Amino acid sequence: MEKKVPLRKCLGCMSSFPKKDLVRVLKTPEGEVVIDLGGKKSGRGAYICKNSQCLKKALKAKRLQASLETEIPNTIIGELEKELNIANEQ
């Protein structure tokens, strides 16, 4: 029997993709915002395509902030941009 592939919606382009194709941004129970590349940490997650344009759209429309119910620190935005650029180069 085939396993069902979990789909998640990108907050930039608002399209659904398999969970493993997206980058997860997480707000931990302690309120800290981190990037969860493994997708296994506990907390409130939001997903973005591995595309820097989607990150810009999600930030501009404040969808990432609204989904995680908190402000996104500039350090996390920088790490996300770096991670997405690395993904785009592969």
Image (cartoon, rainbow, N blue to C red):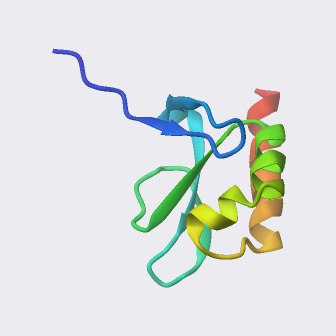
Residue lying furthest top: 1
In the depicted structure, whether residue 12 falls above or below residue 31: above
Residue 47 place in picture, x, y as percent: 58, 48
Q: Quadrant of the N terminus?
A: top left
- Say which quarter of the image contains residue 75: bottom right
Tell me the residue at 39%/66% (across/down). Answer: 42
Q: Position of residue 78 (x, y in %)?
A: 83, 61
* Rendered-image quadrant of the C terminus: top right
- Image height of 72 relative to 10, above or below: below
* Quarter occupied by residue 62: bottom right
Q: Is residue 62 above or below residue 32?
A: above
Front one among 90 and 74: 74
- In the rendered image, residue 74, in percent from the top left (x then y), is placed at 83, 71
Q: Residue furthest bottom?
A: 30
At 82% from the left and 41% from the top, the residue drawn is 52
Q: Is residue 16 left or right of residue 4?
A: right
* Residue 37 relative to residue 86: left or right: left
Count of numbered badges drawn on the protein = 0
Name the residue located 58 percent from the left edge and 39 percent from the top edge.
Answer: 22
Where does the image place residue 27, in percent across and percent down from the top left? 54, 70
